[in-house]
Amino acid sequence: MNGSPDGLVAEWMVDSLHVRVFADRAKMGLAAATFVAEAVRRLGEGRRRVRVVFAAAPSQNEFLAALVAPGQVDWSRVVAFHMDEYLGLPADHPAAFRNYLRLHLFQPAGLPKARLELIPGEQIDRPAQVCLDYEEALRDEPPQIVCGGIGENGHLAFNDPPVADFHDPVLVKVVRLDKPCRIQQVNDGCFERIDDVPTHAYTLTIPALLRPEVVSIVVPGPRKAEAVAAALREPIDESCPASILRTKPGAVLWLDRESAARVM
C-alpha cells in the first residue's frame, strides 16, 4: 500500500463503509475537511441552508482547523447542530462541547448565533422537554451532513454500549455515561479526575446520526485502534455502536496510521 502525495496510505470498503487511512493526523484532517467542504457545496446548490451536525472532541482538532481555513467552506449558508452535551454544564464551562465548538468552529468560521442549533446542557429541570425541543429542531430542518468520531468504547456521540439502540424510536435522549466513556474524557484532558466528569448527558441517538445523506467520521490516535478494529471486524452489534456505520451507504471513516494499526 504505497502512499500518495495527499498522505493517503490505504483505502478499502467494509460492507457499505469507505475506510481511508492517512499518514498522519494533519493529512487525515485535511482530507476529511476537503470531503465535507465539497459536500457542503454540492448540497448547497439550489438551497438556502445546509445543515451540519458536528462532534466536539480533541479528535476533531485537525479536521476542524482545516475546515475553517479561508476559502474552504461558504459558511454563509451553514446551520450548525451538535451531537451531544453534558447534562448540567453551562455553555461557557471549559469542558462543555458548546465551548469547544465555539473556540474551534463557530468563532473561526464567523457563524452567528442565529445559525446555531445547540443543546442547552445546563437545563436540568425538564430534560425530557429539552430532548423534545431539540428533536423538533432536527425534524424542522433535517441535517444533511454529520461530522463525527468514535469513542474509545466504540460509542457514537454519547451512545455508549449499555445505552446504544440501533432502532431507537427517538432522535435525542438523556443517557447515563459508561465508565470507559468518562475515563476517556480524562484521557482527553477535558477533566482532571473521573469524579469531575458528569454522569449524564444529552445525545443524538444512532438513528438520528445515520439519517443525513453524508456521514463523515474522523478517528485519529492510538487509543482508538481497538474501537476501530471492533467496528470494522466484529459483528454489527450495539456492543460496539460504531459498527453500525458499516450499514450506511456512502459513510466514510477517516483514520491515521495509529488508529488503523489493528486493521492494516
Image: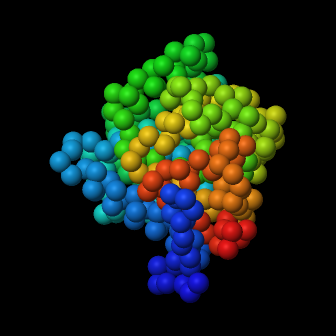
Left or right: where 121 falls relative to 82: right
Left or right: where 168 falls relative to 47: right
Q: How many marks?
A: 0
| In the image, farthest residue toward the left | 46
Quadrant of the frame with the N terminus: bottom right
Lateral position of residue 44 relative to residue 56, left or right: left
Query: For residue 15, what is the image quadrant?
Result: bottom right
Q: Is residue 235 above or below residue 206?
A: below
Q: Name which residue lies at 17% across and 48% down.
A: 46
Q: Is residue 105 visible?
A: no
**Residue 140 location (% of width, % of height):** 34, 27
* Image position, residue 66 (x, y; %): 45, 63
Residue 81 placed where, x, y %?
A: 44, 38
What residue is drawn where x is 61% and y is 44%? 156
* Colour logic: rainbow
Residue name at image x 46 percent, y 32 percent = 118
Which residue occupies the foreground of this view, 256 or 212? 212
At a point 71% along the width and 55% down the height, the residue shown is 234
Residue in the foreground of this view, choosing between 195 and 217: 217
109 or 4, nearer to the observer: 4
Q: Residue furthest top?
A: 125
Q: Quadrant of residue 84?
A: top right
